[in-house]
């Protein structure tokens, strides 16, 4: 089966699981963040063009277990950026993969039939981009949901778009795919690539590793504490527990790393 279709069906299944847990897909941004939170991934907004985005609109930082996205656009557009990065976690991605510069919620699942776009769409990098975009769209607005709303409830594309706060062209593309593309059953042997635990997750989840580090140090001193982010705090909580052996020094006036996820309220 085509990898793009596998990605879409995985995303639709994740959508259904989230709804079953009580998440509301009509609130797209909260819906996407809830999925990230379930995976113990922090989500932070940052200014468009921030250095940590590496020229893209959003990025997943495995070492920090963090999704950064540019703080621009509608809630649905921001949700799409978050869902796009979740797809990197769910489907797997090369550690040295280039950042995606063009994220398109209304992207067609088929390559362009003519011109230079046909060549670009068949490149490995472009196929990866298509896969991640369609995963995000399917997670936020699955084709079966759009089809049911249109065919069984009689809603127009505009009405569906208004209900979900989604762009008209995104809903239109999903409905066209739902009505015109033949259904394909997901094969049971379709597998995804999973990330291994990073250092933070290993310390949090493995008592033996945590105890090893705790036994090495009587006290932990953190300088420049004004520059820590959520992942840093999680690491300290895992290593220091109630904080009796923890000493931190910081000055909020010297904070310069907000673009890297630093949070003043943690000081």
Image (tube, rainbow, N blue to C red):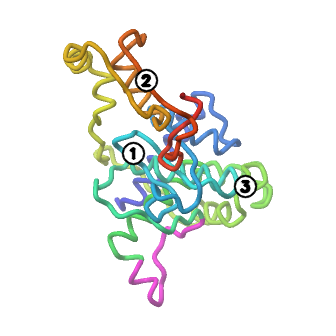
Q: Mark 2 highlights which residue?
A: 248
**SS for callout 3:** helix
Q: Quadrant of residue 208?
A: top left
Q: Is residue 116 magenta?
A: yes
Residue 206 is situated, as x and y percent measured from the top left of the image, at 26, 20
Q: Which mark is residue 45?
A: none
Inter-mark Cα distance, 3 to 2:
57 Å
Q: Which residues are magenta?
A: 106-120
- In the foreground, 86 or 115: 86
Which mark is nearer the camera, 3 or 2? 2
Inter-mark Cα distance, 2 to 1:
36 Å
Residue 57 is situated, as x and y percent measured from the top left of the image, at 52, 60
**SS for callout 1:** helix
Q: Mark 1 highlights which residue?
A: 90
**Quarter of the N terminus within the rendering:** bottom left
**SS for callout 2:** strand
Asked if residue 15 shows in the view, the reply is yes
Image vertical order of residue 44 relative to residue 218, above or below: below
How crowded pointer 2 is (Cα within 10 Å; few <14, some 14-19, many 20+) is rated as few
Residue farthest to the bottom, as pictured? 115
Please indicate whether residue 12 sits to the left or right of residue 235 in the image.
right
Inter-mark Cα distance, 1 to 3:
29 Å
The tag earlier along the polypeptide, 2 or 1, is 1
Q: Mark 3 highlights which residue?
A: 150
The tag earlier along the polypeptide, 3 or 2, is 3
Residue 64 is situated, as x and y percent measured from the top left of the image, at 39, 40
How crowded pointer 3 is (Cα within 10 Å; few <14, some 14-19, many 20+) is rated as some
Q: Quadrant of residue 23?
A: top right
Residue displayed at 53% across by 33% down:
251
């Amino acid at each position: 089966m085509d990898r793009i279709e596998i990605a879409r069906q995985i995303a639709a299944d994740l959508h259904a699981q989230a709804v079953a847990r009580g998440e509301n897909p009509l609130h797209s941004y909260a819906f996407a963040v809830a999925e990230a939170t379930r995976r113990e991934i922090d989500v932070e907004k940052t200014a468009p063009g921030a250095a940590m985005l590496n020229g893209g609109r959003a990025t997943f930082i495995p070492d920090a277990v963090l999704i950064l996205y540019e703080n621009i656009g509608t809630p649905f557009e921001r949700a799409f950026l978050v869902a796009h990065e979740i797809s990197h976690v769910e489907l797997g991605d090369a550690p040295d993969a280039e950042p995606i510069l063009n994220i398109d919620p209304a992207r067609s699942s088929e390559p362009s039939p003519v011109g230079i776009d046909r060549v670009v769409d068949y490149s490995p990098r472009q196929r990866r981009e298509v896969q991640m975009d369609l995963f995000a769209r399917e997670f936020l607005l699955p084709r079966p949901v759009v089809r049911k709303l249109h065919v069984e409830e009689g809603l127009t594309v505009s009405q569906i778009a208004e209900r979900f706060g989604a762009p008209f062209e995104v809903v239109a593309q999903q409905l066209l795919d739902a009505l015109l593309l033949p259904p394909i059953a997901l094969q049971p042997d379709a597998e995804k690539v999973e990330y291994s635990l990073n250092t933070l997750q290993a310390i949090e989840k493995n008592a033996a590793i945590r105890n090893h580090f705790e036994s090495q140090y009587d006290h932990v001193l953190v300088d420049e504490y004004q520059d820590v982010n959520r992942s840093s705090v999680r690491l300290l909580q895992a290593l220091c527990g109630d904080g009796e052996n923890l000493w931190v020094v910081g000055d909020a006036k010297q904070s310069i790393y907000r673009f890297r996820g630093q949070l003043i309220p943690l000081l």
